[in-house]
Image (cartoon, rainbow, N blue to C red):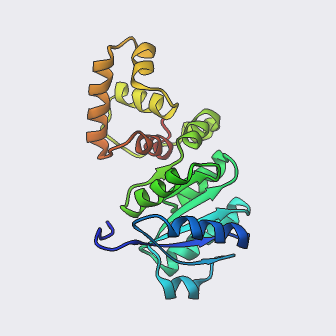
């Protein structure tokens, strides 16, 4: 469900390090369109239910299982809230697990502040966000079992699926045209059709699709 543009996005930060949580709170408080409603060192159902955030930023400082459990608690407590996991490292296995657990976004902590704010605003509208560096890393390092798992059905042609994979690998349209021996204009046309079929508007969303469907 899209958030109303007439009010700021209510944001809550969960980080086990109080100093980091305070710094993030200060950063987000200066961003137009965001309204900090609180911070915490751990997920607290009562607190979340009271402040009712639109977006919850979860810092990854625990194992994948713990993170998935925290996501589950957040989803149960505030079902309409979007969740963005922020990690110190590019963990492809963690990325896959938190997306499967219901996370709406995933970013690395060394991201530029403006990009982090963009990620929050993106997932607040109902669009998933995945740090492109992590998405490509996952596709390059996933095991054969993941690559061969049945994917979500879509109506992409084999050529379009191939282009989605190359987008997820971080290639530009020019690089894709060289790799597939196609004109750049043809590649642009393919990308436009892909976006239309998948009902997406960005290459980041194409990475998310590739991850979810096992295109590799």
As drawn, 148 above or below 115: above
Q: Residue furthest top?
A: 181
Give the residue drawn at x 39%, y 11%: 181
- In depth, the one of 127 and 102 nearer the eye is 127
Residue 150: image x %, image y %? 48, 43
Give the residue drawn at x 51%, y 62%: 102
Q: Is residue 95 left or right of residue 187?
A: right
Give the residue drawn at x 64%, y 45%: 92
Residue 26, quarter of picture: bottom right
Residue 9: image x %, image y %? 41, 70
Give the residue drawn at x 47%, y 52%: 129
Residue 175: image x %, image y %? 45, 19
Residue 74: image x %, image y %? 54, 75
| Count of all numbered marks drawn on residues in the image | 0
Q: Residue furthest front?
A: 30
As drawn, 151 above or below 66: above
As drawn, 160 above or below 43: above
Which quarter of the rendered picture does the N terminus lie within? bottom left
- In depth, the one of 40 and 211 nearer the eye is 40
């Amino acid at each position: 469900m899209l958030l109303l543009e007439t009010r700021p996005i209510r944001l809550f930060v969960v980080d086990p390090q109080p100093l980091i949580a305070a710094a993030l709170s200060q950063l987000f408080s200066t961003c137009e369109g965001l309204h900090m409603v609180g911070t915490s060192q751990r997920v607290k159902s009562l607190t979340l239910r009271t402040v009712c955030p639109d977006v919850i930023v979860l810092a990854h400082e625990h194992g994948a299982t713990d993170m998935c459990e925290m996501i589950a608690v957040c989803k149960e407590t505030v079902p309409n809230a979007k969740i963005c996991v922020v990690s110190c490292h590019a963990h492809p296995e963690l990325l896959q697990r938190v997306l499967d657990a219901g996370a709406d976004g995933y970013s690395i902590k060394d991201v530029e502040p403006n990009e982090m704010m963009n990620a929050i605003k993106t997932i607040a509208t109902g669009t998933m966000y995945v740090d492109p560096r992590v998405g490509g890393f996952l596709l390059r390092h996933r095991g054969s079992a993941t690559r061969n798992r049945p994917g979500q059905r879509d109506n992409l042609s084999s050529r379009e699926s191939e282009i989605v994979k190359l987008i997820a690998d971080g290639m530009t349209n020019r690089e894709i045209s060289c790799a597939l021996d196609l004109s750049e204009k043809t590649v642009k046309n393919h990308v436009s059709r892909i976006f239309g079929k998948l009902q997406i508007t960005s290459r980041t969303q194409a990475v998310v699709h590739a991850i979810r469907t096992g295109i590799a």
